[in-house]
Amino acid sequence: MPPRVKEEAEDPLPPHIKEEEEDADVTTVVPLDGLLAPLSDSDHMEEPSRGDTDSQGADGQSECSAKEAALCDKKMSQFARSVCGKGVANRAKLARRVRTRTGGKKFRCSHCGSLQAHMRIKHTGEKPFSCSFCGQTFRQKGSLLSHVRKHTGEKPFSCSFCGQTFRQKGSLLSHVRKHTGEKPFSCSFCGQTFRQKGSLLSHVRKHTGEKPFSCSFCGQTFRQKGSLLSHVRKHTGEKPFSCSFCGQTFRQKGSLLSHVRKHTGEKPFSCSFCGQTFRQKGSLLSHVRKHTGEKPFSCSFCGQTFRQKGSLLSHVRKHTGEKPFSCSTCGRSFSHRAAMATHARRHTGEKPYPCLTCGKVFSQRQHLVSHVRTHTGEKPYGCSTCGKRFAQKPHLATHARTHTGEKLFGCSVCGKSFSQKGGLRSHMGKHAGAEKLPRCSLCGKAFSQMAQVVAHMSAHTGRPLSCPLCGESYAHKGSLMEHMRKHNAGGQ
């Protein structure tokens, strides 16, 4: 039986491999036709990828059949004779023979200039290595071995600093740089450095504007492949990341990690100005802008600037009139998600905000905040004219009218106006013949015109008028207008 062949990195040269150019006269090594024609699947012995020794036995020889070994020996000997007229016993001797005959020159691929015999596979697109678990194919055996570890769970590469294990050596090297602080990849545009080459390439696209990853559903393009994959899940509805605490699923791994911190209470992001901690890095960045005053998000309609992108998007809907959030119970739409959530509680009766002092519950957080001040005595709203302070902003607005003389509430019978709604109600009962005025059949309230009674009935049947800023709803247009003035007075 012929001896088994020990494979080396240098192989018999395919027809498109020629010597690396060292001087003017370049020699191209070309085997005789047919001597090294591509072998069939039955008689071809694959070369190992660089650093791949898993297929070799204890004696360092390849684990191929006797028939394959003999055929390889024959083919290599024939090729050697084509070069110098003498045969060789194995591939190692062939490599040394060729180097001797060619003056020790290395060999370069005539197609693209890259070295090594793997160019045969790259040029032809051949993927001869197949995963026995899922059938996925690969060009190199090393890539297959790395992939198989996803199925087996094997993580043979361990960090000497913290013990964390990895499937791929490259992942380990990238991880180690977190401990060493090494950032060997530098941006040629701005000089920023990175631990991973992939992070650098993604960053460079910010400068070049390149977005090479395109969504096959809607055509939207992205700088990073990960961003594309996350976006595609919006179309497919896939949510592959699941919370081990409550089972909630997410499209992005980052969203899952942020959610898990709600269960663990972890807040790893700390403000360097005041020490406040946050679960999400984005929340920290938004908070820091309160200290720096930075407002990087600008409205293209009016130029108003905002600290948060979400605040800008909400503001833009004032200009566009868009109301993308719809109530699943009654179909009513809202410009803000929070306004829709608050509205939905009217249907469900949910009151998720309890007072820790007295136990009273509220459907809106702001109502709880206002209520808590009755316990603490806090009065954060001060009158700019006389300094009197109030616990609630609407109370301040009502008080301010005593200084300005503004009277928003007018009598529909005589036209007299009042600064407070309660004053108008008292006045309406003083009109002669009030008992003959049209009245509400539910509460008995009197009006000067039947149209006003019809409008008033909506107070009993619903609130069709909604504030475009916060989503709060009202039965009367006047109430809505009064509410809008509170926004304007507050600078919103």
Image (cartoon, grey):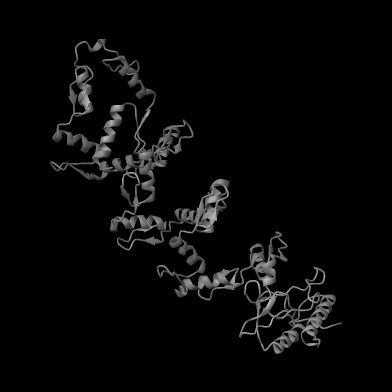
Quadrant for the N terminus in the image: bottom right
Residue 376: x and y, percent? Answer: 25, 45
Res. 421 visible in picture: yes
Point 28% across, 56% down: residue: 293
Residue furthest front as drawn: 24
Residue 165, quarter of the rendered image: bottom right
Q: Describe residue 435's horizontal placement relative to residue 310 as left or right.
A: left
Quadrant for the C terminus in the image: top left
Q: Is residue 4 above or below residue 390?
A: below
242 vs 69, nearest the viewer: 69
122 vs 110, nearest the viewer: 110
Residue 388, quarter of the rendered image: top left
147 vs 315, nearest the viewer: 315
Residue 45: x and y, percent? Answer: 77, 74
Residue 25, quarter of the rendered image: bottom right
Residue 405: x and y, percent? Answer: 14, 31
Residue 338: x and y, percent? Answer: 40, 41
Res. 243 visible in picture: no
Q: Describe residue 80's horizontal placement relative to residue 359 as left or right.
A: right
- The number of numbered discs placed on residues in the rendered structure image is 0
Q: Is residue 297 above or below residue 33?
A: above
439 vs 171, nearest the viewer: 171
Point 17% across, 34% down: residue: 401
Q: Is residue 458 above or below residue 267?
A: above
